[in-house]
Image (cartoon, rainbow, N blue to C red):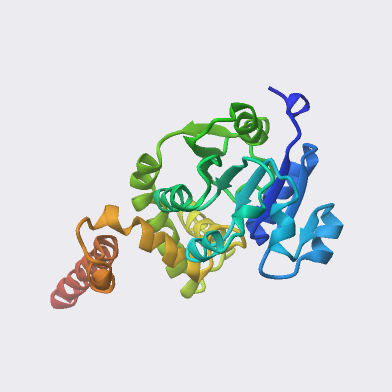
Amino acid sequence: MSSSSQNYLKIGIIGFGPFAQFLVKTMIKQGHSIRATSRSDYTDLCTQLGVSFFRDMNAFLESNNDVILLSTSILSLSQVIKTLPLNCLRKPTLFVDVLSVKEYPRDLMLQVLPSDSDVLCTHPMFGPESGGHGWKDLSFMYDKVRITNEATCSSFLQIFSSEGCKMMEMTCEEHDKLAARSQFLTHTIGRVLAEMKVEPTPIDTKGFQKLVEVEEVTSAPGEICSPNNRYGLWLYLHHILSVGIHKSDLHKNNTQLREVELAFETVKQQLLKRTNEELEQS
């Protein structure tokens, strides 16, 4: 279905950082009306983009949004959503999150939001770096957690399907089980490469080019690269990786971190063993 047959939505965005700015450009291109609010003042940028920026949260919630998109960091979501003056909502509204973990925001929205608010959990599996030249064939995960207004939900999902995204409907639990290994490992290795200041050279192999790409993608603005988001990803996927471990023991008991450490140590010992063998023979 083409974007021309979409119902145009009034979309309010809470958290107007790099990822939200990236999404908004396509939403505006499709004809949707965008309003935004954020901790920082983005008035000038929003004016350039054609977005209405609100400094006052009451006025933002009173602006008759069809959809409210939560684009905060993982760690700040709880404070943001629990301090919303929800009594200012003019009508039942579809709340959508775009966080990289799914069970945590789902549970929080179900706990805090009015019962007549619809809840859609999503994860666009791309960002400004990986989706900068279009969204075709890029994955978009979603879970219709609580939907009564199917028309509004469908119109929002069409923002992504009309751009050619690979639409993947799955539960939040299924998402987090898959993400627990793939996302955490990707961003951890990307951070290690960044700390090593890995850069391309004139004689790179294809394998090294791929490593540089991992570092570049995970370090790009909007690609959940901030320290807070990396920690949030680790914290709220942790229960899948190490079931039954208390939060106070996270720093010493994380299974995924132990696996990374063990793998590096195994490779290190293999190299040292081979080096010692060569020295003994020389």
Quarter-wise, where is residue 219 in the image?
Answer: bottom right
Above or below, 142 relative to 278? above
Q: Nearer the viewer, residue 153 or 213?
A: 153
* 88 to the left or right of 109: right
x and y percent of residue 28 in the render?
Answer: 78, 44
60, 32: nearer the viewer: 60
Image spot of residue 252 (x, y percent): 23, 73
Q: Residue at x 60, y 62 (%)?
A: 220
Query: Which part of the image, by quadrant, shows the C terminus?
Result: bottom left
Q: In this view, does 231 lie to the left or right of 44?
A: left
Identified at 75% across, 50% down, the residue is 63
Q: In this view, does 38 lie above or below 104?
A: below
Q: Where is residue 231 in the image (x, y as percent from the top left)?
A: 42, 67
Q: Can residue 28 be seen in this view?
A: yes
Residue at image location 21% in from the left, 65% down from the top: 266
Q: Nearer the viewer, residue 124 or 264?
A: 124
Would you place residue 143 above or below residue 90 in this image?
above
